[in-house]
Image (cartoon, rainbow, N blue to C red):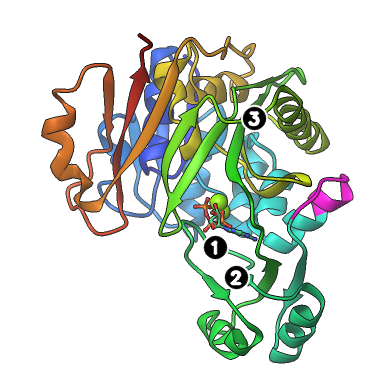
Amino acid sequence: GAVIGILGGGQLGRMLSVAASRLGFRTHVYEPAANPPAAHVADRLTTAGYDDAEALRAFAASVDVITYEFENIPTAALDILEAARPIRPNRRALAVSQDRVSEKTFLNDLGLATAPWAEVNSAADLDAAIARIGTPAILKTTRLGYDGKGQARLRAPEDAADALAAMNGAPAVLEGFISFSHEVSVIAARGLDGSVACFDPGENVHRDGILHTTTIPARLTLAQRTDAVLLAARILNALDYVGVMGVELFVTDQGLLVNEIAPRVHNSGHWTQNGCAIDQFEQHIRAVAGWPLGDGSRHADVVMENLIGDDVLRVPAIAREKNAALHMYGKAEARPGRKMGHVNRIVTKG
Ligand code: ATP
Ligand code: MG
Ligand code: MG
């Protein structure tokens, strides 16, 4: 049987491993940290850093294709891996989404709307950006941000110095603050043959910068739903993408704005595990393995809730609920802000 190599052993790598073994593949997970969530489900685990050329070469030699659960893989590691085996999704998808400037440039060049933005590498840049974009606004580091980390909000121009200090000297972008009515995401998949399939868009609510719930179906008109799916498909085609991508959107009176894209399975797609015959994890494995995409049509309404930090204390109660599917990540320590698991509640009518 073929072996799927997965870079990253967090909860996404864990759930990718489970999906891969269901299809009869073996998985080999590469993860720098000890005892990651994927450790208990992967067939093989390499614990080594992304600077360990020998470990990277051995990992690549042991697998047939390489995929990943996160976008911040160092370029030098990718060079070593790509010399040996195909990486899916491809390098361009990673390069574009690793950096908010290249991401927004790519999206705008495709004709897709984003929040107004400007590159900020100095106090003078920030002053000019505020003069053009105005406030309220958000300053974000261009790289390595997730769960709202590396962001500072500016209510007024006077907040500029504090916001810049919060970047710790890292390159940043200023974004105009969008007064969206709500947020949705499209979990889109593209196969090796170029076919595209999108899951039904979900509506996302964030708390303290972290995804709190995803509700399916999202509040969207049919026209908005079509726009959302078409723009996601354009992004995947433009990147000659293979795999699953999360496309985060703001719903505004002026139409849909793209917030960001993630070249991997996405937290807002976890509902598919209990709302579709083929979930995002299997869809991703199918794509990277060169299989036909599966049927991701939705058979139920679902509300996904992330269980973060102390939320794990509610697990015994959730375990007694009807129509509530728990997915725990096997993390020992429930630190604040740490994603411990999620629950998919199937919404039954009547
Ligand atoms: P993720 O964990 O999704 O990768 P992230 O750290 O990359 O998160 P963003 O998605 O950029 O952060 O922002 C997190 C949330 O903050 C958004 O989902 C949205 O609720 C809010 N937000 C971000 N940018 C803007 C904006 N320009 N206007 C209004 N709200 C915003
Ligand atoms: Mg992000
Ligand atoms: Mg985001």
Which quadrant of the picture is home to ligand 1? bottom right
Q: Is residue 98 left or right of residue 72?
A: right
How many other residues sit within 10 Å of disc 2, few (<14), some (14-19) or many (≥20)? many
Residue identified by numbered label 3: 220
Secondary-structure class at tag 3: loop
Instruction: Let me know if residue 113 is in the magenta part.
Output: yes
- Please name whichever residue, 226 or 31, is drawn nearer the observer in this view of the structure: 226
Q: Which residues are magenta?
A: 106-114
Question: Residue 75 is drawn in which quadrant?
Answer: bottom right
Label 3 Cα crowd, 10 Å radius (few <14 / some 14-19 / many 20+): some
Q: Type of residue at label 2?
A: Thr
Please give left or right for residue 301 compared with residue 95 in the image.
left
Three-letter residue code for mark 1? Leu
| Closer to us: 4 or 137 | 137
Which amino acid lies under the numbered mark 3 shown in the image of this protein?
Leu
Which residue lies under the disc numbered 1?
Answer: 144
Residue that label 2 marks: 141
